[in-house]
Image: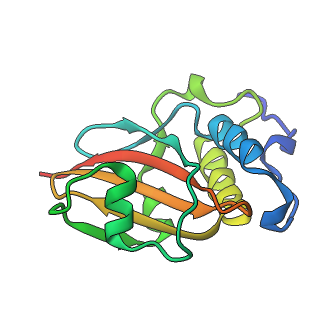
Amino acid sequence: MVPRNNNKDFFKFKLESSHSLPAAEVITKLQELTKGLFYLSEADYPVEVVHYPVPTPELLTEKDVLALTGSSGNQPVATTDVASFFRNVTVTNPQNLPAKAESASDVITSLRTFCEQHLQNTKVYLLGSRTILALLLGKTPEGQLLGLKTTIIQT
């Protein structure tokens, strides 16, 4: 039997308002939490942090998202809920887990909780049809847009 690490401080976050951390600190923490995470589809792609430091409107339209990502205007855009984004996120190699993590599930739950606590108006956008750019985007208190991205392959 493998001894379990009882130090879960790495995965606990105070229930702070989203105004508590500046964008740079949110980005740093997201980078720590996404290390070694992949999105499982017909090909596995890493989950990465994305940051758009430009001011964005309160509510993003499909056209805004296409412009931010440099995607073509005729590409389909769909939205989905945050839970759907995290459903296929996993750690493909347990050695990639942070030292204080007990399981991949701990890391993914912590990442989702952190996003919910520190990003406002979070929404998931799916751009494309077969090769899909998946973006989980939210705003910082400074109005910067940041979140997570990955690629999903569907044939």
Q: Residue furthest top?
A: 95
Q: Residue at x 32, y 45 (%)?
A: 151
Q: Is residue 95 above or below residue 43?
A: above
**Residue 121 seen anywhere in this rendered image of the structure:** yes
Q: Residue at x 39, y 74 (%)?
A: 61
Q: Is residue 68 above or below residue 47?
A: below
Taking depth in this image into account, of 81 and 144 the one nearest to the observer is 144
Relative to 3, 136 lies left or right: left
Q: Position of residue 43 (x, y in %)?
A: 26, 38
Q: Residue furthest front?
A: 55
Q: Position of residue 76 (x, y in %)?
A: 20, 66
Relative to 32, 68 lies left or right: left
Taking depth in this image into account, of 111 and 91 the one nearest to the observer is 111
Which image quadrant for residue 80?
bottom left
Which image quadrant for residue 92?
top left
Q: Is residue 40 above or below residue 1?
A: below
Q: Position of residue 73 (x, y in %)?
A: 20, 61
Q: Is residue 65 above or below residue 50?
A: below
Q: Residue at x 45, y 72 (%)?
A: 60
